[in-house]
Amino acid sequence: MTQHEKQVSYVGPFITMVFLFLIVGFLTTANTQFQGPLKAAFLSGVGDLKNTFATLITFSWFLAYPICGGIGSSWINKYGYKGTLVRGLFVMIAGLGFFFLSSLFTVNFPDSNLQIGSNVVPYGFFIFLLGSFVVGASATILQVVINPYLTACFVKGTQPIQRLAIGGSANSIGTTLAPYFVSGIVFGGLAMEDVQVKQLMIPFLSLMVVISIIVFILMKLSLPDIQGTRVQEGEKLEKSVWSFRHLTLGVVAIFFYVGVEVCIGANINLYAIEQNYASPALMATLYWGGMLIGRLVGSSLSKVSPRVQLIVTTISATILTILAISLNNPWLLTAVGLFHSIMWGAIFTLSVAHLGKYTSVASGVFMIGVVGGAILPLLQGIFADAQGWRWSWFIVIFGELFMLYYALFGSRIRQTAD
């Protein structure tokens, strides 16, 4: 950050990025919360593989991260931060259009199904999976912009991890609201077995309109660029971004972080349904609400290093998950959200430290790790079909332990961009 850039007011752009973080969080969690309702609405003809098919919704979303992270980085270098945000939001509108189309197609062609062995799956379900991938691509591109921008933009009285925590707090507000948006607004508070596919249409059309308005407003706003965080025209990178060990291991750490975060956030309701608990949506809301509280607390921890924060939270999350398995109690998993809350900001801050002009490229590479949100919940769903949900939570314990290793050893900087 140059002296000139410190004189530029980034308060407005900072608020813009925080709001966009809220949108990303809302849509990410809304997408995962469709697993339960769509399991009832779309997958009534699927036999013993309902959990596996339902988790494909989350899988398709997070599959976009490793595929599209590089696109976000190249767009930043070509179009700048603002131009990339606008293009990313247009991708989001297209994805929401596929969500609408999935419902429209299924309602108008109810007998259009794919036979997979003894399982019958509507083609509309696969259109929904495509929409999930496209909106996931948009979320990827937006985060490739948001994360380095929040880290690098100068706002007086804040540190990079605090700004990420504030953005994360907005993200958590979106994730906290999303479960009740799906169950209460989209599906009108109906029991899952009474859900109708036609109820998808109006909410997704409404979201398309809202995002279109956001694009219009964003195009009118000033979003100053930040020098030294991306490759300038005609400039080349002398090193491979993978040569920075703390970044490479950070990508692996974020793979496990997003994987275990989504395992609980997306699958805790399926675990609760298996055990006949009332209000499974409440558990997901409490989990994401715990993340909101944790991030609000994290935004005030200016004197605690990211490394110490990551050590304390991974140990605490591991203990809670072990207790949840031992007691076979999903309610204990809701408390893990409190400790998952600041892990993203801590890992990202440690991963891009001292990377200079490699930062925007590193942000795109960092998104590759988010595919953990696709792979681990899917593996957990397969495991749950075979052994039940209780023992599947050992996946979460393994992920927490790797993040603890990264905090203790993997994040140590051995090479800088200088």
Image: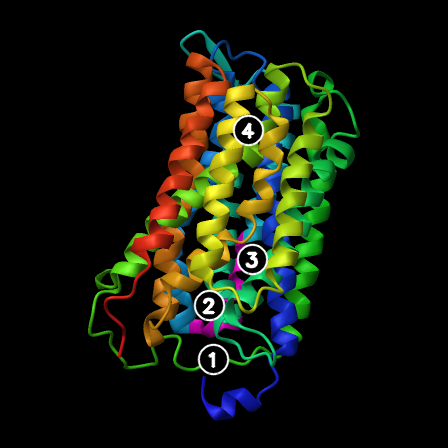
Q: What stretch is highlighted in magenta?
A: 79-91
Image quadrant in which you'd find residue 34: top right
Amino acid type, callout 1: Ile
Is 353 positioned to the left or the right of 295 in the image?
A: left
Judge depth for marks 2 and 3 and give the one in front: 2
Which residue does the image show at 56% across and 69% down from the upper left? 302
Which residue does the image show at 58% across and 52% down from the upper left? 24
Packing grade of label 4 (10 A; few <14, some 14-19, many >=20) is: many
Is 107 positioned to the left or the right of 149 in the image?
A: right
Which residue does the image show at 57% across and 91% down from the upper left? 7
Q: Which residue matches tag 1?
A: 226
Judge depth for marks 1 and 4 and give the one in front: 4
Q: Position of residue 159 (x, y in %)?
A: 53, 72
For the question of whether residue 123 can be seen, the reply is no
Image quadrant in which you'd find residue 265: top right
In this rendering, is residue 308 above or below 280?
Answer: below
Which residue does the image show at 60% across and 45% down from the upper left? 338
Disc 1 and disc 2: Cα gap in Å?
Answer: 10 Å
Disc 1 and disc 4: Cα gap in Å?
Answer: 39 Å
Residue 267 numbered tag: 4
**Image color mode:** rainbow
Packing grade of label 3 (10 A; few <14, some 14-19, many >=20) is: some
Amino acid type, callout 3: Phe
Judge depth for marks 4 and 3 and give the one in front: 4
Amino acid type, callout 4: Asn
**Disc on the earlier residue, 1 or 4:** 1
Q: In this rendered view, identify the residue nearer to me: 213 or 7.
A: 7
Image quadrant in which you'd find residue 32: top right
Q: Which residue matches tag 2?
A: 148
